[in-house]
Structures are given as C-alpha cells and as structure tokens.
Image (cartoon, coloured by chain):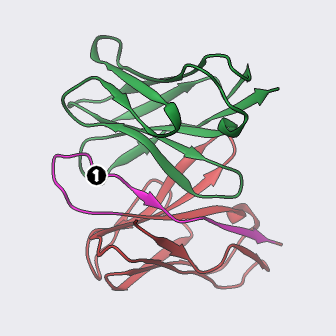
Chain colours: A red, B green
Amino acid sequence: DVKVTQSSRYLVKRTGEKVFLECVQDMDHENMFWYRQDPGLGLRLIYFSYDVKMKEKGDIPEGYSVSREKKERFSLILESASTNQTSMYLCASSGNRRNSGNTIYFGEGSWLTVV
Amino acid sequence: AQSVTQLGSHVSVSEGALVLLRCNYSSSVPPYLFWYVQYPNQGLQLLLKYTTGATLVKGINGFEAEFKKSETSFHLTKPSAHMSDAAEYFCAVSRGNNDMRFGAGTRLTVKP
C-alpha cells in the first residue's frame, strides 16, 4: 500500500513564526502535493511538485513556499505564520501513469493552529 | 478548466436506507472522476474512480458511481447505509494530469 506520512498531526504556532510541515511518501511517486482543507471550501491546492527541485503554484500559494530536495520528501513552509493560516494541511502523492487517471494518495493531515 | 459541484453539504439517512451523494462536473476534455472518503481526523481515502470503459464503477465498502456524460454527473450510491459510512465524501475531477479539482464535500450522517 502507498504510504504518505506527515510528520506532525497537531501543531500550535505563534503569529510570525516560521513553520515547516514535512511529508514523506514511500512509493517512488513523481508528483507530490500540498492542499489545505477548510470547512465549506473543500480542498484547495497550495503547491505541487512533479520532480525533484521542481514546483508549481496551485490556487492559493500566497504566504507559502515549498521545498523538494529529494524525491520522497516534500516540505511546506509558512515563512511568517498568520492566524488565517489556521487549517488542516494535507500532503498527497501520485505516480505518472499518463492518460490513466492518476490516483492521488493522501497523508493523515496536519492540524495547524496559529495563535 | 474543470470544476466540481457537490449538491448538498450535509446529507442525513437512516441506517439501511439508500445513500445518494450528488456530484456534477465541468470539463473541457473527457474527465477522470473520483470519489474520496474522509473519516474524522484522517486523510482522504479513494473510494472509486472512473477513467475509461464501463460507466458504472464499483468501489470499496459497497459504494458505486455511474458516469453520465449527458448529465455531466458522477453520483455516488450505496443501497443500504451503515453507521460506519458516516464521514465526509469528496468528488474530484481530473484531466489525467496533475490538475485534480475537488468539490466542497458532503458530510453524510447515518441515523440509527
């Protein structure tokens, strides 16, 4: 089974702090994603990466950055956390089977509270 | 660009009753369609997906969905609800690349 592991399930950070959310997948997937989930808004894509050191902005990249130095690891960085970034963050990965509907596999989620 | 609309943010059914969760999509190309389930405090788990071929897709836990191109729909059904089905369900559409779009989700409550 595919396993996507997010290092922290619950975090509480102060406004202005730099926050790192780490994600590791064990299926040698090319693609990795960071979403945030908010009630009534579903999942919104923050950033994704289709290869090591490559990244693409999603729908809501403002206030976030990412890092992918190794294929299995994708980090989400909040340079200066703000209260409106309090949310559930979901990491995901998928392989590159073209034209076959790439299933995205999700981690358990990281609940971030910014106070 | 593709998008997904899930009709009804909350659906409540009695145990043993039919479950119907509605999903309509828009896509400029033939879509790939997915249903995911999220149990409390967990990530999303794939229930089923449609890529090509048979339009009636069977998934895990007795769920199935039918792709209806003429109606641009991909509704999720289960003949008989179980208490363990209580969760949030997300419909998603993709063009087969990395651009997957999710609906806002439908929370299913199952009453005893």
Q: Which residue is mark 1?
A: A102
Confirm whether the magenta stretch covers residue A107: yes
Q: Is residue A29 left or right of residue B76?
A: left
- Residue A23 in the image: state x and y as whole percent: 50, 77
Q: Secondary structure at mark 1?
A: loop
Confirm whether the magenta stretch covers residue A24: no
Q: Is residue B32 above or below residue B80?
A: below
> Tag count in the figure?
1
Q: Is residue B80 above or below residue A19?
A: above
- Which residue reaches farthest bottom? A69
Q: Is residue B19 left or right of residue A96?
A: right
The magenta span reads A94-114
Q: Kindly identify the residue that appears in the image at 48 percent across and 75 percent down.
A: A65
Q: Is residue B36 left or right of residue B104?
A: left
Q: Is residue B68 above or below residue B44?
A: above
Mark 1 is on which residue type? Asn
Quarter location, residue B65: top left
Residue toward you, A97 or B4:
A97
